[in-house]
């Protein structure tokens, strides 16, 4: 049996665009609060990881603002190229800061003190950010928006950083392993560079118009087959099972 994925109607596109703007606004609001709290807690505890996490929130706000700017236009597609560039640059800035901060910490730049507020901030972000990322990715896939999917990856990367920060703060408090989060942060920096390159090239997977409405699986497995030459899929795609379904 052949299933046909149709591009969303004009009315549905308007609904999805409004949803993406609302999700971007929610992301901005939360990250502004998170940035202030993390920078304050980082200053109190002399924690470079917490300060870095707060600055990452600032970068996430930049990415979400770029997405909001794109979808405030009557024709968001006309602003997609520039928005992808802004999101890519935010990835590179995040990778650069995380890498420099991690190296500084590993080379004896300072040892953070125990921070209960930092642990609470990291735990909250670990619970909230995946939900925002999933909702934005789903809407972006159905609309066929590469920028919405790219920004959802920025939000997902913030989730990874939340996990790294939480583990690092807990290990530092419980065992005195000050170097734990710095080592993991270098891995996150590598991921950020990869995603930045993909956003710069426009190689964002899972942007098939209508996919969010017709696919039950909304995880990242759909991106497994995407390479550096991935292109946006056409508006209508016939999916068959074997030669007989083509």
Image (cartoon, rainbow, N blue to C red):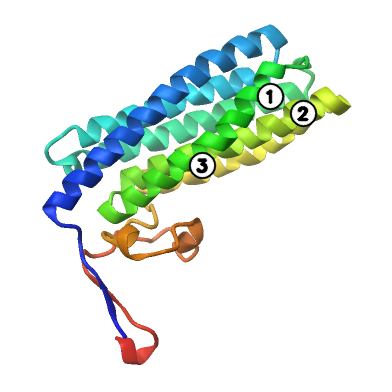
Q: State the residue at coordinates (74%, 30%).
A: 168
Measured Cα–Cα span from mark 1 to mark 3: 17 Å
Q: State the residue at coordinates (21%, 69%).
A: 236
- Quadrant where the image shows the N terminus: bottom left
Residue 130, disc: 3
Q: Are marks 1 and 3 in contact (CB under 8 Å)?
A: no
Q: State the residue at coordinates (47%, 42%).
A: 131
Q: State the residue at coordinates (43%, 31%).
A: 90
Residue 163, disc: none
- Left or right of 235? Residue 180 is right
The residue pinned by badge 2 equals 170
Measured Cα–Cα span from mark 2 to mark 3: 21 Å
- Element assignment for label 1: helix
76 is higher (above) or lower (below) than 220: above
- Element assignment for label 2: helix
For disc 1, the neighbor class at 10 Å (few under 14, some 14 to 19, many from 20) is many
Residue 119, disc: 1
Q: Residue furthest bottom?
A: 244
Q: Looking at the image, is mark 2 or mark 3 earlier in the sequence?
A: 3
Measured Cα–Cα span from mark 1 to mark 2: 7 Å
Q: Looking at the image, is mark 1 or mark 3 earlier in the sequence?
A: 1
Q: Are marks 1 and 2 in contact (CB under 8 Å)?
A: yes
Query: Where is residue 183, by image quadrant?
Result: top right
């Amino acid at each position: 049996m052949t299933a046909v994925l149709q591009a969303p109607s004009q009315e549905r596109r308007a609904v999805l665009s409004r949803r993406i703007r609302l999700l971007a606004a929610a992301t901005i609001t939360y990250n502004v609060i998170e940035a202030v709290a993390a920078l304050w807690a980082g200053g109190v505890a002399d924690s470079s990881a917490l300060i870095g996490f707060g600055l990452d929130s600032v970068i996430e706000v930049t990415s979400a603002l770029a997405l909001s700017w794109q979808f405030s236009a009557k024709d968001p597609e006309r602003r997609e190229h520039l928005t992808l560039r802004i999101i890519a640059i935010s990835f590179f800035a995040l990778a650069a800061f995380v890498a420099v901060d991690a190296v500084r910490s590993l080379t004896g730049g300072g040892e953070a003190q125990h921070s209960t507020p930092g642990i609470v901030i990291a735990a909250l972000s670990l619970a909230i950010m995946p939900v925002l990322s999933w909702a934005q990715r789903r809407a972006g896939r159905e609309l066929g928006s590469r920028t919405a999917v790219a920004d959802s990856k920025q939000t997902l990367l913030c989730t990874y950083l939340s996990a790294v920060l939480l583990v690092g703060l807990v290990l530092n408090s419980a065992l005195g392993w000050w170097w734990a989060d710095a080592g993991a942060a270098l891995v996150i920096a590598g991921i950020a560079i990869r995603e930045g390159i993909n956003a710069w090239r426009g190689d964002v997977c899972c942007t098939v118009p209508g996919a969010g409405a017709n696919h039950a699986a909304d995880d990242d497995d759909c991106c497994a087959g995407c390479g550096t030459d991935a292109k946006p899929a056409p508006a209508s795609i016939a999916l068959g099972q074997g030669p007989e379904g083509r």
